[in-house]
Structures are given as structure tokens and as C-alpha cells.
Image (cartoon, rainbow, N blue to C red):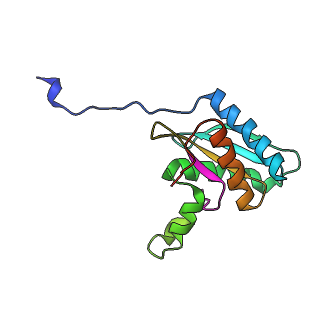
Amino acid sequence: MNTDTYPAKSFRMPSITRAAAGSLISAVHEAAAGIGFEAVVAVTDAGGHLKAFDRADTTPFLAAETAVGKAWTAASFHVATHVLNEYVANPKVAPLAHHPRLVAVGGGYPITEDGRCIGGLGVAGGRHEQDREAAEAALACLGFDVGGG
């Protein structure tokens, strides 16, 4: 039997490193301070599993769940959460908004390297515009794509 005729049975899935996740958290906190708020930051791997997390002392407790949800959503859909927010406004896609982990509010971005999603970044604690701005600044600071959708 010639196994060369069968399709591949697996593929390598790139994932963000712990060091890069930690650097993103630091960069978000620095950007958030410059914008004027304290942040909760969550970083997931490409499969949406939590890789790193940090919550500033004064952030509301609900912001922690929100940041994790934004990171999971961005990694799952490979699109920024503010873009997904626009998608779920469409009645044909609106049922997605009822998924218990989906957070379609600005501040979540897929983390991409060489065109492949390697994780998700979720920022919460400010207004959605502030969360987006801090996430974009951190991604750009570390050389990640800021397109997100």
C-alpha cells in the first residue's frame, strides 16, 4: 500500500509563546495608562485557550470575563471583535450573538503572524474605543498585524 496517495492526517498549528503573551500584556498596560485607564488583558492560544492573563487592581470584576471572552472570540473567528459586532447586526448572523462565550465588543483582536492566527488578545476595563486603542497599540508595538478583519 502506497501511503503517498493519502492526504495528510495533521498539520502544525502555530501558537503564541508565553514570552510574547507576557510582552503583549505589558504593552497593553503601558498603552492603557497613556490613554487613561487600567486594563484587564487576556491572551489565548490559537485554539482560544487562555495563555496569559493580568488584571489591574482597580478594574471591575466583570471586565476580567469580558477580556477573556474578547480574546476567545477573536481567536475563534480570526476577526476583531468590533468587526464581529457589525456582523451580528445582520439578522442572518444574529443568532451567533447568543453563544455564551462570544463577546462582540471592541477590544478583541486575533494575533496573527505571517498571515496565520496564533492567538487572541482581549482588552477590557475602558470604553470599547479605549480597549481597541490599547490593543492596537500593543499589537503594533510587538510587530503583529493590527488589521483584525
Image coordinates of residue 99 in percent, x first then y, are 55, 62
Q: Is residue 27 above or below residue 2?
A: below
Q: In this view, does 76 lie above or below 105?
A: above
**Which residue is depicted at the point 83% across and 55% down?**
60
Name which quarter of the figure residue 23 lies in.
top right
**6 over 59 or under it: above or below:** above
- What percent of the width, then of the height, locates residue 39? 79, 48
Please provide the residue range marked out in magenta.
Answer: 101-110
Q: Is the magenta stretch mostly helix, strand or loop?
A: loop
Asked if residue 96 is positioned above or below residue 11 in the image, the reply reads below
Visible residue check, residue 100? no
Q: Is residue 49 visible?
A: yes
Quarter containing the N terminus? top left
Q: Does the magenta stretch include residue 87?
A: no
Q: Position of residue 44 (x, y in %)?
A: 60, 41
Q: Image check: 38 left or right of 65?
A: right
Q: In which quarter of the image is residue 20?
A: top right
The total of numbered circles placed on residues is 0
Q: Residue at x 82, y 47 (%)?
A: 34
Q: Horizontal placement of 61 versus 69: left or right?
A: right
| Residue 87 appears left or right of 33 | left
Q: Which residue is pictured at 72% across the width and 44% down the height?
A: 41
Q: In which quarter of the image is residue 48?
A: top right
Residue 145 placement (x, y as % from top left)? 55, 43
The extreme bottom residue here reads 91
Between 79 and 138, the residue placed more toward the observer is 138
